[in-house]
Amino acid sequence: MVFGQVVIGPPGSGKTTYCNGMSQFLSMMGRKVAIVNLDPANDALPYECAVNIEELIKLEDVMVDPALGPNGGLMYCMEYLEKNIDWLESKLKPLVKDHYILFDFPGQVELFFVHDSTKKFLMKLIKSLNLRLTVVQLIDCHLCTNPGNYVSAVLLSLSTMIHMELPHINVLSKIDLIGSYGKLAFNLDFYTDVQDLSYLQHHLNQDPRSAKYRKLTSELCSVIEDYGLVNFTTLDIQDKESVMDLVKIIDKCNGYIFSGIDASVVEYSKIAIGQTDWDYNRVAAVQEKYMTDEETKTQ
């Protein structure tokens, strides 16, 4: 049994930086980490990857023949990888014995809530290699400063959770920059807990570009609340405490904390429901570190 993370998120959300920082952090904890780059357009990697999809296919080649654009090219690359999954399995087999795997994916969001190839080849890997994976979806916390963008980000997170059908953690990344993005309409816990989104309607109506879509936005908010699946944790990848808090959540999510434990069902249950300081660290600690008193006031 091998554990790992599927790192996804829109372009610019910090996926590659996350993989680099998480790899270094886990290595300091004593885990052997292997990063698998599955972004055929990422040719400037800050980390040493154990497996690189560019050995199989490159986006720049696909844009020449069969002459696809960047979006279509990425979909083609994922479909090509699905058809050649034996290549990836052969690369991973030497690693799964003793490594923790980080999969660094492209930023094209359609690959994770519309397109099926990514989901299909991940499911094949899970079955053939006995993987225990958690999806870590990064969302730039800058989107919290705009109500329309925030609703879109939450809807994206919900759609991805439903489509991927894997343990899933949503992360507001770059939280150390939250104070520089301007004043939030509500306290940070409103955005991490995805509370009553109807409160955003007033702010959406003030934007003439959003007002014309008032009814659509209201219906989308209702869908999000009806499912009740989405919430966020926060992350500053340069802060060891912040990374450690996220690692604890991921380890509980994919079952890593139970690996190697010879215990009764009762002991497993105690670990699973054990108290955590997650609520404090993802909200209150962030506000203390990165946000001024004025920025944390609720309007």
Image: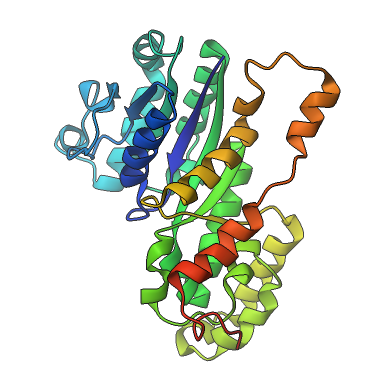
Question: Residue 239's spot in the image, x, y percent?
Answer: 40, 52
Question: Residue 216's spot in the image, x, y percent?
Answer: 61, 74
Residue at 64% across, 35% down: 252
Q: Quarter-wise, where is residue 28 in the image?
A: top left
Using residue 250 as the reference point, say whether residue 46 is left or right of it.
left
Instruction: Look at the picture and state if 103 lies above or below 245.
Output: above
Q: Quadrant of the C terminus?
A: bottom right
Residue 114 appears in the rendering = no
Q: Quadrant of the N terminus?
A: top right
Instruction: Look at the picture and state if 16 lies above or below 192.
Output: above
Using residue 238 as the reference point, say whether residue 114 is left or right of it.
right
Instruction: Look at the picture and state if 117 lies above or below 223.
Output: above
Question: Residue 55's spot in the image, x, y percent?
Answer: 21, 21
Q: Residue furthest right?
A: 266
Q: Quarter-wise, where is residue 56 in the image?
A: top left
Which color scheme does this rendered protein use? rainbow
Residue at 40% across, 17% down: 85
Question: Residue 146's spot in the image, x, y percent?
Answer: 47, 76
Residue at 50% across, 26% down: 122
Using residue 183 as the reference point, say whether residue 281 is left or right of it.
right
Of residue 162 and residue 23, the one placed in the foreground of this image is 23
Of residue 178 and residue 49, the one placed in the foreground of this image is 178
Residue at 21% across, 39% down: 46
Of residue 283 and residue 185, the one placed in the foreground of this image is 283
